Image (tube, rainbow, N blue to C red):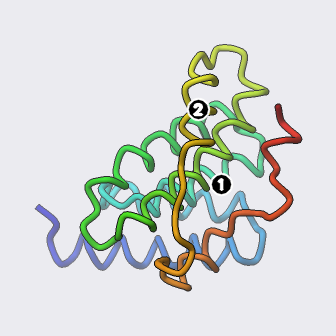
Amino acid sequence: MLTIYRKIMYIFFFLKGRHYFLKTNFIDSLKYFTQAEKYYTEDYQLYVYKGLNEFFIKLFDNALISFQKALSMIDANQKLNIDEKKYLKKYIIEYILISSTVVESFSSYGRYKNIYYNLEYKKDNINKNLLLDFPISDNNNLSKAT
């Protein structure tokens, strides 16, 4: 059960982590997201940000784990509509595929690539804040990694 104290601590560390992420201080950001995780583990956003930090500081094994945790939580999130869920999955899977090119032990590349190319969403149905927080590049970074 999430007590008021745990919720407050989670929000505090999450917001500090996001603050440092936006300042591109990925090491300090990761420290705060790791602290937030001690108080609450059921937020996909936590694992997206944690994975991005790990990705940018080249902890690709850890990033893959965080991104996979985020993916596993998206479908259960009742606040997201179907297009937002597909959009987030595509965003996360792009980073999974790029990270997996450096991690030799990753064996699910083909499965994720197939999912990535089959995810279609209507951009007009996506909350604009989601687009700002997790932008999918128009340059298609995936083609550079494959």
| Residue under numbered circle 1 | 52
Q: Position of residue 70 (x, y in %)?
A: 44, 50
Left or right side of 81 for 57: right
Considering the image in quadrants, where does the N terminus appear? bottom left
Q: Residues within 10 Å of mark 1 (few under 14, many from 20)?
A: many
Q: CA distance from mark 2 to mark 1?
A: 22 Å
Please report the residue visible at 37 percent of the width from the left and 55 percent of the height from the top: 74
Q: Residues within 10 Å of mark 2 (few under 14, many from 20)?
A: few
Q: Secondary structure at mark 2?
A: helix
Q: Nearer the viewer, mark 2 or mark 1?
A: 2
Kind of residue at badge 1: Leu
The furthest residue to the bottom = 128
Among the 4 quarters of the image, the one containing residue 8: bottom left
* Count of marks placed on residues: 2
Q: Position of residue 100 (x, y in %)?
A: 70, 29
Q: Position of residue 18 (x, y in %)?
A: 59, 74
Q: Secondary structure at mark 1?
A: helix
Q: Earlier in the sequence, mark 2 or mark 1?
A: 1
| Residue under numbered circle 2 | 114
Kind of residue at badge 2: Asn
Residue 100's place in the image compared with 3, above or below, is: above
Please report the residue visible at 64 percent of the width from the left and 80 percent of the height from the top: 132
Most foreground residue, 63 or 7: 63
Most foreground residue, 84 or 119: 119
Please report the residue visible at 26 percent of the width from the left and 55 percent of the height from the top: 76
